[in-house]
Amino acid sequence: MVDEARTTPGGWRDRLRRAFAVDLPGPVAPDPQDLPRVQDLLQRIVDRGMTGPAILFLESWRPLGSLTGQGMHALTPFVGAVFDGAAWERLSAFMERRGSIPWMIERLEAMDAQAARPGPPGAPQRPTDRTGNA
């Protein structure tokens, strides 16, 4: 007689084996339906010249990445009154994933480098301060 728990996918042994599994290390991109929202958020940060402070903030929260997402879930009732609650929930679910913060940092750096690169003639330039630094 064959033990169904061993052969059936989703049996109790399979569920127990995956109970404490964590994501693989490294950057994790958002789901395709969330990608435009996250990209838009990151682009707004770059457009405002806040890439450095955003990276510092993300780096400081990297060890607590899953707690960041859970904290965002806790704020949903308050944020939902001002912003799109469903979008906030999806962003917080993305932030709970282990590689979300490294992915966001990599994207911010790439987007900032792209914004700092001079474009074709007549293209809008990135604002600079009085010393000429971007």
Image (spheres, grey):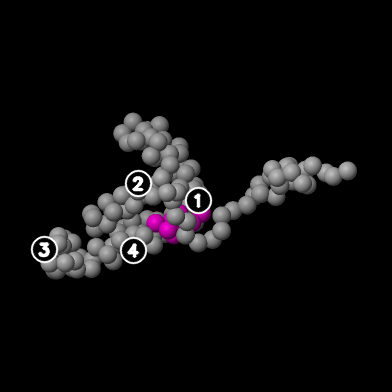
Which label number is shown at residue 13? none
Estimate the x, y position of residue 102 in percent, counting from the top left: 44, 59
Image quarter in which the N terminus is found: top right
Name the residue located 43 percent from the left edge and 42 percent from the top edge: 90
| In the foreground, 41 or 70 | 41
Q: Mark 1 points at which residue?
A: 97
| In the foreground, 38 or 121 | 121
Image quarter in which the C terminus is found: bottom left
Q: How far apart are marks 2 and 4 (CA)?
A: 18 Å
Q: Distance between the residues labelled 4 and 3?
A: 24 Å
Q: Distance between the residues labelled 2 and 3?
A: 28 Å
Q: Is residue 23 visible?
A: yes
* Helix, strand or loop at mark 4: helix
Residue 133 magenta-drawn? no
Q: Mark 4 points at which residue?
A: 109
Which label number is shown at residue 122? 3
Q: What stretch is highlighted in magenta?
A: 97-104
* Helix, strand or loop at mark 2: helix
Q: Which of marks 2 and 3 is in front?
A: 3
Q: Which residue lies furthest to the front in this view?
A: 1
- Amino acid marked by disc 4: Glu
Q: Earlier in the sequence, mark 4 or mark 3?
A: 4
* Helix, strand or loop at mark 1: loop
Question: Image quarter for residue 79?
Answer: top left
Q: In this view, does 30 lie to the left or right of 2?
A: left
